[in-house]
Amino acid sequence: MGDDSEVRYKALEEILVAQTRIHGTIKDLPHEFERLYKIVGTHRTGSPIVVNHWGVSDENGHDMDVCIPIDEPIEGERITITKLPAKEAMTSVHKGPYSEIGDAYRKVSQYTYERGHPIAESTREVFHNLDATSPEESVIEIQSILHDWMSRFASQLESVLGPEIRAKVLEPMNHLAVDSPSTDRQSAICNSLKILEDNSTSHQQYEVLSHCAHVFPVELIPPMRDLLKSTRNVDTVIEAMISKGGYYPKLLRREGNIIYSEKGPANPTAHEAAVTAKDKRKAYCFCPLIRNCIEETPGAFCNCAAGWPKQLWEGIFEKPLKIEIIQSLTRGDDTCEFAIHIPSDFI
C-alpha cells in the first residue's frame, strides 16, 4: 500500500472472501469486522473489503457486502464464501476521518472521467485501518470499479456480427491505453461506431450496444416484479417507481401499450445554468465516453443507454422486450427518451 493520495489504475485480481451483507452505515462496520475476524481466525489474508451498493439506499444507509480475504473456504454463521471477481479500478488512499472521504472520491472521479472511463454502480473500499477512537488515523483505499464497456462491446460484436466485423470495428480503438485522454478515447469510439453503422442493421446495432450499458442494480428489480405479479397493473408499478426515486426512473408515463421513460439531466444545476444548446446537452449526458463530443457521436451509440431500462423492465416482465429510442442527444434532441413496449398479456 502506498502512503499518498495519488490516483492509480489497478487490475484487481479475483479474491476468495468470507462475506456478509448488511444495510447500514460506516458506524456498523467495526462490529461486523470483529465478528468476521473471529469466524475466519488465522485464515484471514488481508484487510477488510467493503463493496458499496449505492443503488440500495435509504435514510438508514445502503447495502454493503462486508468481506474478509481468506486463504481457503471455511464455515461460519451468517457468512457466504465467495470470490470477488477480477476488476479494473482507479484507486486512491484516503487518510483521516471517513467523514472527509468525499474529496478523495471526487478526485478519483475527475481523474477517471478525464480519461473517458465510465465508473460502475458499486465501489469497493479497503479498510487498512478504521479507527473509531482516533478517526484521523484511519486509512482507507478507494477502489472505483471501471465499467467494462470495452470488453462488453468487443464480446457483443463477435457474438452478433462475427470475428471479421469485430476486428474491423475495433481497429480504431486498438491503440488506446488505460491512461489515454478522453479526447482520444472519444474520437476512437466515434470512428468505431461509424464502421459499425456501415456494417450492420439497426437491429444488430441495438443487440450489440444495449448489452454494453451500466448494470442496473439487480436488488431493485424483484420488488417491482413482485408488485406487478400481485397487482397485474403496470400503472401501479410506474407510480411506485416514481414515489421511491433513487435509481428508479422518475420521468415515466404510459400511453396505451407503451411506457415512455425519459432521463433527467446528469447535472441539473449546470443544465439549468447552461446558455448554449451544446452546454445543455453536455450537462444532460451521463456518459463520459461521449459527453464532450455528443455532436460528433453516431446516433447508434444511444442504443447503449437503452440497455439501462431494458435490464429493469425485462426483469420486471421476465421476458425480452422491445425498447425503442424516441429521442437522444446523439440524434440532435435535447433529451433521451425510450419507449418500452408492454407485452400483450399485460395490456
Image (spheres, rainbow, N blue to C red):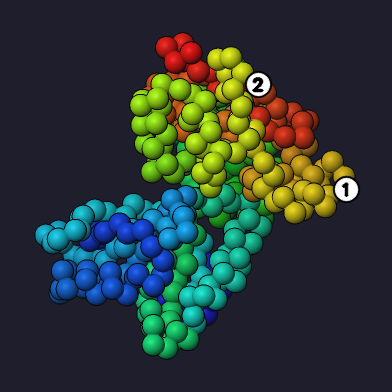
Q: Position of residue 212 (x, y in %)?
A: 51, 36
Q: Position of residue 252 (x, y in %)?
A: 60, 31
Query: Which residue is farthest left?
Result: 75
Q: Amino acid at mark 1?
A: Val
* Circle 1: element type: loop
Q: Residue sitting at 46 percent across and 41 percent down?
A: 215
Query: Which residue is farthest bottom?
Result: 134
**Residue carrying label 2:** 198
Q: Residue sitting at 35 percent across and 70 percent down?
A: 28
Q: Position of residue 108 (x, y in %)?
A: 57, 65
Query: Which residue is farthest right?
Result: 275
**Residue carrying label 1:** 275
- Residue 188 in view of the camera: no
Q: Amino acid at mark 2?
A: Asp
* Circle 2: element type: helix
Q: Is residue 239 above or below residue 162?
A: below
Q: Is 318 in front, or is 209? A: 318
Q: Is residue 42 above or below residue 318?
A: below
Q: Residue sitting at 51 percent across and 37 percent down?
A: 241
Quarter of the image holding residue 126? bottom left
- Residue 271 in view of the camera: yes
Is residue 266 shown left or right of residue 168? Answer: right
Is residue 104 shown left or right of residue 284? Answer: left
Q: Residues within 10 Å of mark 1 (few under 14, many from 20)?
A: few
